[in-house]
Structure formats: C-alpha cells, structure tokens
Image (cartoon, helix red, strand yellow):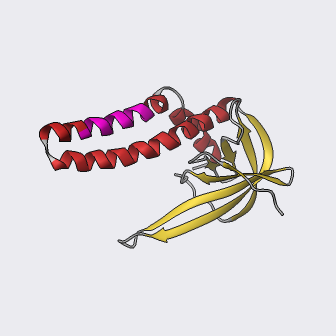
Amino acid sequence: MTLDEQIAELTRAGSGTLWELARPGAVLLAAGLALAGAFTRNPVFFGIALAAAILAYAVWQTAPHIANAARGLREGVKQQGMVEIFLHQWKDAESNVHESFEGRISMDGRTMWEMEFVTPQHWQPREGSYPAQLAFVRGVEWPVVVLMREGLLVPRLKPRRASPVQ
C-alpha cells in the first residue's frame, strides 16, 4: 500500500465519532459482561469480561492517538525531522513471533521524543534512522503522526520526552 493510500485510510478510519465512542463503548462492554456473569453466575461471562477489559484498556490508550493522527494528516502543521526506529521481537509460549516498534524522534539534530508505535498494517518498518515529516496539532506537544517514504507511524502510548544526551 502506498503512502497516499495509507494516509487516505487513516484519515477515513480515524475521523468521525467511531474513535470517540470506542473508548467508553469498550469499557461498557467489559462492565456489562461482568454484570452478566454476576447475575447468571456463569464463569464464561467472567472470562469474556476479562478479555474485553484487556481490549478496553488497549483501546483506551490507543484511540486518542489514532484520532489525533487523522487530525494531524488533515490539518496538522508538518515539519521535517528524523526518526530512529528500533524493532523488538519476542516469542510467546506457542512460539508465535511478536514485534513492537519504538522510535526516537528528532528535529534540528536534537532528540525530542521517545515513543512506541502502533504496529503498521500495510508495511514493515526496518531498524535505522530515516528522514521523516512530523505532523503536529494544536494542544498536543509531540508529533501525532510520523510520515516516512514507506508509510505512517502513529504513537501507541503517550510519548516520553527524550532524556538529554550526556
């Protein structure tokens, strides 16, 4: 998928009320399943409620960043910068390989932010330093989306300010 297609998809998916409703909706689903378990005393509901609570936690943390990224693509201020990507791989108990992507964002030669990225859907980032466009929106101090030649990177969690180099 090209960068322009990724931009169009994220702008379409991250717009509107879907992400605004996802956070409370996921929490209400988990709470409703827990209540169903309490009233029916069926342990299956508690198991499903636990899975829904884990999903709700992930949605609660990620949804605002996806909505901000879509907003940044539509109306954000873009600046040139660099992103240094780090790939972490691990295996679970069933030998499935999992990956996470982290990066250091810098502008004007100064590292500003360290962030973990949502796993990209349509491309595979590689470790290394790359030029990038950083999109900023009013009210958010970190870049809400990183545009690289190959694709988009969106923060998964609230980024951390980079510690000064000593």
Which quarter shows the C terminus?
bottom right
User: Residue at the top extreme?
Assistant: 17
Marker count (numbered):
0
Where residue 139 sits: x, y (%)? 69, 30
Helix, strand or loop: magenta stretch: helix
* Residue at the image point whose x is 60% and y is 47% from the top: 155
23 within the magenta span: yes
Q: Is residue 28 above or below residue 143?
A: above
Q: Is residue 9 above or below residue 104?
A: above
User: Residue at the right extreme?
Assistant: 108
Q: Is residue 132 above or below residue 26?
A: below
Where residue 50 sits: x, y (%)? 31, 48
Question: What's the magenta region?
Answer: 22-34
32 within the magenta span: yes
Residue 79 lies left or right of residue 45; in this view the side is right
The quadrant in which residue 65 appears is top right
* Residue at the image point whose x is 34% and y is 33% from the top: 28
* Residue at the image point whose x is 43% and y is 29% from the top: 21
Of residues 116 and 80, the one nearer the viewer is 116
Where residue 100 sits: x, y (%)? 55, 60
* Residue at the image point whose x is 14% and y is 46% from the top: 42
Where residue 89 sits: x, y (%)? 53, 68
Residue 121 lies left or right of residue 143; in this view the side is left
The quadrant in which residue 33 appears is top left
Q: Is residue 89 above or below residue 73?
A: below
